[in-house]
Image (spheres, rainbow, N blue to C red):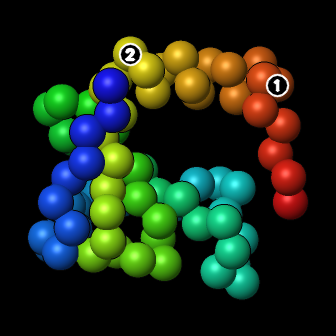
Amino acid sequence: MTDRITTGTPPPRGWRKSSYSNSEGGSCLEVGDGHPAGVPVRDSKDPYGPVLLIPSPGWASFVWAVKAGGFPAHR
């Protein structure tokens, strides 16, 4: 299950932009570090907007599938 962190709260520290994000502002995804319950994910263009909290096992499965080619990148 994915939880939603409250909108309008100050952004947590330690955000990293996806290596697939580009400098023109399109398709920007950021993940947060150090959350005890999982991996926070947000749209970097809206740092005070909604944040999804993905449980760590689900995030690990997603990253594994991306690395295995299960979700080809579209640039």
Residue 72 position in % (x across, y down): 84, 37
Q: Residues within 10 Å of mark 2 (few under 14, many from 20)?
A: few
Q: CA distance from mark 1 to mark 2?
A: 19 Å
Residue located beneath label 1 in the image: 69
The quarter of the picture where the N terminus appears is top left
Name the residue at 66% across, 66% down: 27
> Is 1 positioned to the left or the right of 66 in the image?
left
Circle 1 sits in a helix, a strand or a loop, which is it? loop
Is the C terminus in the top left, top right, bottom left or bottom right quadrant? bottom right
Q: Tag 2 or tag 1, which sits nearer the N-term?
A: 2
Please provide percent x and percent y for residue 62. 57, 25
At x 38%, y 16%, the residue is 57
Q: Is residue 65 left or right of residue 6?
A: right
Q: Secondary structure at mark 2?
A: helix
Work out whether residue 2 or residue 22 is closer to the camera in this orientation and state it: 2
Residue 24, image x and y in percent? 71, 83
Q: Position of residue 31 (x, y in %)?
A: 41, 50
Which amino acid does the dot numbered 2 rest on? Pro
For label 2, the residue is: 57
Vertical side of 18 occupied by 61: above or below: above
